[in-house]
Amino acid sequence: MQDIQILIVDYGSQYTLVIGRTLRELGFRSAILSPEKANIFLKNGHPLGVILSGSNWSVHNDGAPQLPKMLDISGVSYPILGICYGMQLLAHLKGGVVARPLGHREYGPAKVEVETNHPLFKNVSKETNVWASHGDTVQELPSGFTSIAMTKGIAGMSDEKNRVLGVQFHPEVVDTKEGKTMLRNFLNICGCVSDWNPSNMIHEIQNEVLKLLESTPDKKVILGLSGGVDSTTLATLLGPVLGDKLVCVAIDTGGLRLGEIEELKENAKSAGVKNLVVVEAEDEFIKAISTTTDAQEKRGKFREVYSRIFEEK
């Protein structure tokens, strides 16, 4: 974790993982950690920048998540970018005023006018389309901060040295048309150097599995193969390096689409899987869930049957 350039503090936003994915698309490695785990990381880690995610919390709620205690809120050690709740939390703790003037959440597309002279908005249009998803908003900036983006209210803020920044909208989602440019600008402010390539991840996964098997050469790797994107991709990564040591288990639940098992077998073969076990379990699944009408209960029973069959095999 020491070589992680950007720390993303996760406050529970549905878009937090999108931040990490977008940074990878830009070619940069990051770590997504809860405030508690981020605090542990910051005791010994030295990120080049920190991003605070959005959240469904209000800074005024009892029990609202806070900043990691080890976070240098001054921005001296590293630049900080607060997104949505992250901006509100920074403003609130630094003496600004956060409130809900509209009395309801603002959700959907919006137009923002940005200060193009600010390094966060370099090469961004003066007026740009963004995605908003918030109830609270920063009504009054903390001392020493200026507004760098506006809608009907404050949509962006910056301290005097451009080290502590915040945006009320979500630059990580595709609906913010120039969001990637904004995030790339923040990475430049942090002095980050591109260190991510998808091929690196492939080799890392393959090497990790091979290292695990070095100490137990007689063991095999068992992989549940559903036919979906995730398990098929993993089988494709592991098949060429593990050969006979990889055993894939596919469970026919009786709810698959017509011809899906045949497609799964063909994909497994193309992925280099030499050992594929297909379990016919339609009767067991029907018996377990056919009389259940509640969706959540049905999902729970499905997982139980799936896990039991997989572990048995």
Image (cartoon, rainbow, N blue to C red):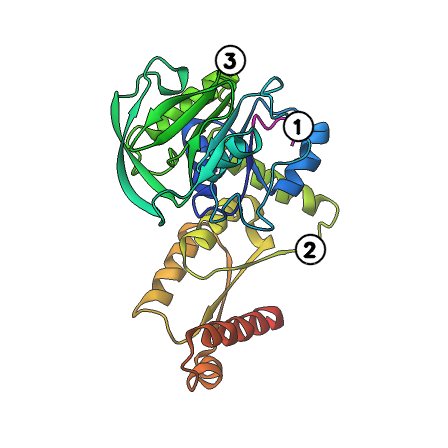
The quarter of the picture where residue 120 lies is: top left
Callout 3 crowding tier (Cα within 10 Å): few <14, some 14–19, many ≥20: few
Which is nearer the eye, 245 or 72? 72
Tally of numbered tags:
3
The N terminus is located in which quarter?
top right
What's under tag 2, amino acid-wise? Answer: Lys
Q: CA distance from mark 2 to mark 3?
A: 56 Å
Query: Which circle's residue, 1 or 3, is located before the other in the chain?
Result: 1
Give SS at disc 1. Answer: loop
Is residue 141 highlighted in magenta? Answer: no
Q: Position of residue 26 (x, y in %)?
A: 41, 27
Give SS at disc 2. Answer: loop
Q: Is residue 283 above or below residue 142?
A: below
Which is nearer the eye, 40 or 204? 40
Identify residue for label 1: 2
Q: Is residue 186 above or below residue 56?
A: above
Identify residue for label 3: 161
The secondary structure that most of the magenta stretch takes on is loop
Q: CA distance from mark 1 to mark 2?
A: 32 Å
Which circle, 2 or 3, is nearer the viewer? 3
Q: Position of residue 25 (x, y in %)?
A: 41, 32
Taking the spot 32% from the left edge, 69% from the top edge, the residue there is 257
Please provide the residue range marked out in magenta: 1-6
Which is nearer the eye, 215 or 85? 85
Answer with left or right where residue 149 lies relative to residue 5.
left
Which circle, 1 or 3, is nearer the viewer? 3
Callout 2 crowding tier (Cα within 10 Å): few <14, some 14–19, many ≥20: few
Q: Position of residue 236 (x, y in %)?
A: 46, 47
Query: Which circle's residue, 2 or 3, is located before the other in the chain?
Result: 3
